[in-house]
Amino acid sequence: MVLNKNFIKIIFSTLIISGCSVLAVHQYDDEYGKQRPINRLTENINKINAWKEAKEILDDRCVVCHGCYDAPCQLNLASFEGIERGASKEKVYNTRLQAAEPGRLFEDAFTVKQWRDKKYFPVLNERNQTPEANISAGLMARMLTMKAPETPPHSGLLPDSISISLKRAQQCPTIEEFDHFEKNYPSWGMPYGLPALSNREYGSLISWIQQGAPNYQSEELSMKLLFVKLVALYFVVKRGSGNSHCFGSFHDISPILVQCVPNQCLFRFFHFFRKQLQHNLR
């Protein structure tokens, strides 16, 4: 049987890239330590302000592409939980013969380790937390640096090297694969196909990443969203699976949860349950 030459090239290239990736893992481990989940919660006021400023920039410049369920590489930058989840090489919408394992935020995993077990890879440095490592071993920082403010802007139409076609090949490199990606796609820095960040925007994001990408509200927001899901589940069970019943009641209770902190949520949540049970038992 004669194998197609293109097929042989693909196999050969895949083996080379895989081998390089393994070597890169050892290189990063030797230089910056082993990869592990990082606790990024902080109460330091300067770090809190750094996150607030970074969040505004992410919302203004990044969420337009990375804020949906089918965002490129499944990287959702609309919440800190999405940033910590990281990215995936799997496409959300793709032709497949078997069901794909879902990766819904607040639904299919709740910790960084669980997302790593699901083959999501980090975009923030998860090795030793030093300013140098947070930039050099952080995928998000490296992607931004590729298109730093001093990068000459494109004039007129986008060059052929930057495709905005929906059919373009998806490129989702890990940090260990980044050198190969940067060499092959030097103009694919972030924001992709859009003007570079301003000096202020770039400086704020890089400063936040250098500090270890601190966050101060992840736990509170996660608890609120978890309570919202529990309420929705309650109405599905008590009133049937019809969406109209579930979401009609969901909107009745959601303002209670949005306006309270976790401990208050716990009290109000069960207080609401008690009242609903009393009503249903009449």
Image (spheres, helix red, strand yellow):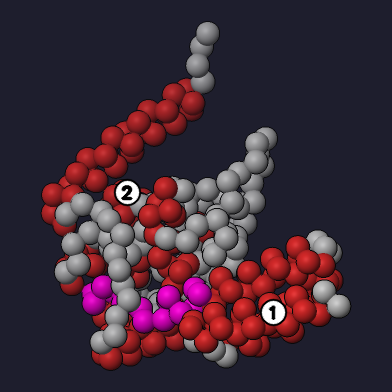
Q: Nearer the viewer, residue 226 or 83?
A: 226
Query: Residue 262, how many percent across, how many down?
Result: 49, 82
Q: Nearer the viewer, residue 230 or 248?
A: 230
The image quarter in which residue 182 lies: bottom left
The image quarter in which residue 113 lies: bottom left
Query: Residue 249, how many percent across, how many down?
Result: 77, 78
Name the residue at 26% across, 73% down.
212
**Amino acid type, mark 1:** Arg
Name the residue at 31% across, 72% down.
40
Front position among marks 2 and 1: 1
**Amino acid type, mark 2:** Glu
Q: Is the Cβ of the residue at disc 2 closer than 8 Å to that at disc 1? A: no
Tell me: 124 left or right of 282.
left
Q: Nearer the viewer, residue 167 or 56?
A: 56
For the record, the magenta segment spans 209-223
Q: Which mark is residue 274?
A: 1
- Residue tagged 2: 177
Residue that protrudes farthest toward the top in the picture: 1
Query: Residue 95, how many percent across, how many down?
Result: 66, 42
Name the residue at 82% across, 75% down.
280
- Residue 161 showing in the rendered view: no
Gap in Å between the C-alphas at discs 2 and 1?
Answer: 53 Å
Q: Badge 2: few (under 14), some or many (20 or more) residues near its Cα, within 10 Å?
A: some
Question: N-terminal of the two: label 2 or label 1?
Answer: 2
- Residue 166 showing in the rendered view: yes
